[in-house]
Amino acid sequence: MTATFSCDLNGPAAELSHFWEHTIGSGHATLGLRADWQAQLKQVHDELGMRHVRFHGILCDDVGTLIGEGDTLFYSFFNADLIVDFLRSNGMRPFVELSFMPGVLASGDKTVFHYRANVTPPKDYAQWAVLIRKLVGHWVDRYGLDEVRQWFFEVWNEPNLTAFGTGKQSDYFELYRYTAEAIKGIDPALKVGGPATADNAWIEDFLNFCRAAHLPADFVSTHHYPTDDFGQPGDDTEAQLAASRRSALREEARLVRKQAGNVPVYYTEWSTSSNPRDSMHDDPYAAAFIVKTVLEANGLVRGYSYWTFSDIFEENYFPSVPFQGGFGLLNIHGIAKPAYRAFQLLHGLGTEMVQVDGAHETVDAWFVRGDNGGSTLMLTNFALPRHPIVTEQVCFTLTSAPPATSASVQRIDTEHANAKRRWEEMGKPEYLSAAAVDELKEVSELRSEPFVTSQEGDTLRVNISLPPQSVSAIHFLHG
C-alpha cells in the first residue's frame, strides 16, 4: 500500500529552532587535548552547526584540576583552560558536566571507565564547594562574566546509576546544594541545573527538593536511550531494541516536559542505543532513527545532545577498527557515518515546520519551509530491529504551491552515503591507508540528484521509493 501524505505550503507552521544543534556529546575531557579530536569537533561545528560540547571528567585527576600532596591541595586549571580555549577559538562553548570526584576529595575508591573516574561523594562537601568556586571563578576572570553566563553547569552524570553514584538520592541533592550555592555565589545569572540522570529519572524529586530548599534550577537535564527498560535482563542490544516502542523517546520527552513545568529541559545524552559497540551506530538505520527522533522532539526540549560526535572515545578501550559500532557520528579517521549525514540534512532545514497529514506504519514525513522560496520534504522509512519493514512507495501532495523551479533529492540508505558498506567490500581492513581513508570519505558524501515532480495548477505531487531504514530529503525552490 502506498504511503500517502499531504501538506499546504501556506499552512500554519510551528517553529523549528534547531534545538539539536545546541549541544553535542564527547567522551572524556582529556580527549579535548588531542589534535584529531579538535579537528573533528571543528568539522561538526562548521558543517552541522553544533554550538556546545559536553563531556565527562573535567574534575578527574588526569586533568589535574585538583590534586593533593600530603595535607596540601593544589588547584591547576591549565589543562581545563586549554580545552575551553580551543572551544572558544572554534566558536563553541562548554556544557560543563561537573564530574567526577578528584581523588583527594573522594570518600571512597569506587571508579568507572578505564581512566578510573572516581564516582564516590566528597568526604567534605565544603571543600568540594571551594573547588567549584575556584574553578568557575577562574573561568569568569579568564573569559569574562558575559561569556560564562552563556555556559551551562550540570551537576554530575547519571547519579541514579550505581556505576556513577555510590551514594543515595539524598547524597546527590546535597552535592547539588553545595554546587549551586557555590556557582550562584559568584554570579546569580550563571546557569546551573541537574539532575543529569539516566532514563528520565528523579525529575519531580529534584525540582521538589530545589523548591523546598530554595535552590535554583535553571534547567533540567536527563538522558534516555531506546534500550532503556526494554527487554529482559541479559538481552543483547538488538533484543532490547526489538522490545522497545516506535517513538518511545518522544513519549518520554513529553512526560519530562510536563514534569519540568516552566523549567527548560536539556537532554544531555541520547543515541540509537546505549551500547558503545553497537554495529547499528554505523549503519543507515541510525540515520533514519536520528531524523525521526529529532523532528518528533520539536517543541519539547531546548537542547538534545547526541552521544557522541566522534569515535575518538575511550570509556572502555580505544579500538583501531575503522567501523566498530562506536557512538560517534565520525569514525576514528574522521569518516562520516550515515548518522553524521542525517545531522547534515537536519542542519540544512529551515525554521518553519508545516503540518503534514497522513500516517504509515514505517514511513514518516515532515515538511519544513526555508528562506527565499526554498522548502524541504524529509522522509524516513524506519522500523526497530525484528519489526516488519519493506521498501515503500510514497506519494506526497503539496497544495498552494507555485511551480517548483527546481527539485533535488539527497538520500541515505544502503546504497547512498554509506561508507561502512564500502569498507566491508574492501575486506574490513583494521588499518586504513591514506588512500583508503580518502575513498571512504568520498563514498560517505551526500549526493544531490535532480528530482522529477508533477504539477497541476497549484498542486505539486511527489512519488518516491524508500528502501528500509532510509532517509530522503527532497528540496524544492518555488518561483
Image (cartoon, rainbow, N blue to C red):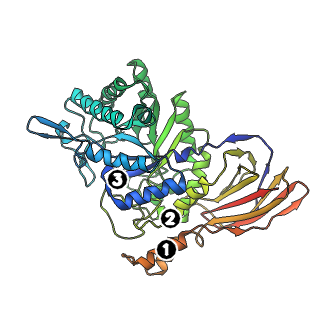
| First along the sequence among labels 1 and 2 | 2
Q: Nearer the viewer, mark 3 or mark 1?
A: 3
Give how far apart the Cα atoms at labels 3 and 1 are.
25 Å
Q: Are marks 3 and 1 in contact (CB under 8 Å)?
A: no
- Which quadrant holds residue 47? bottom right
Q: Position of residue 445 (x, y in %)?
A: 56, 68
Query: Within 10 angstroms of label 1, few (less than 14), some, or many (20 or more) residues?
Result: many
Q: Residue at x 60, y 70 (%)?
A: 416
| First along the sequence among labels 3 and 2 | 3
- Is residue 236 something that shows in the picture? no
Q: Position of residue 450 (x, y in %)?
A: 73, 69
Residue 73: mark in rendering: none
- Is residue 124 something that shows in the picture? yes
Residue 32: mark in rendering: 3
Give how far apart the Cα atoms at labels 3 and 2 are.
21 Å
Name the secondary structure under disc 3.
helix
Q: Are marks 3 and 2 in contact (CB under 8 Å)?
A: no
For badge 2, the amino acid type reads: Lys
Q: Position of residue 176 (x, y in %)?
A: 34, 29
Vertical arrangement, residue 18 with respect to residue 395, above or below: above
Vertical arrangement, residue 199 with respect to residue 375, above or below: above
Q: Residue at x 53, y 69 (%)?
A: 444
Name the secondary structure under disc 1.
helix
Vertical arrangement, residue 449 with respect to residue 326, above or below: below
Q: Nearer the viewer, mark 3 or mark 2?
A: 3
**Residue bearing mark 2:** 337
| First along the sequence among labels 3 and 1 | 3
**Residue bearing mark 1:** 440
Query: Within 10 angstroms of label 3, few (less than 14), some, or many (20 or more) residues?
Result: many
For badge 1, the amino acid type reads: Leu
How many discs mark residues in the rendered view? 3
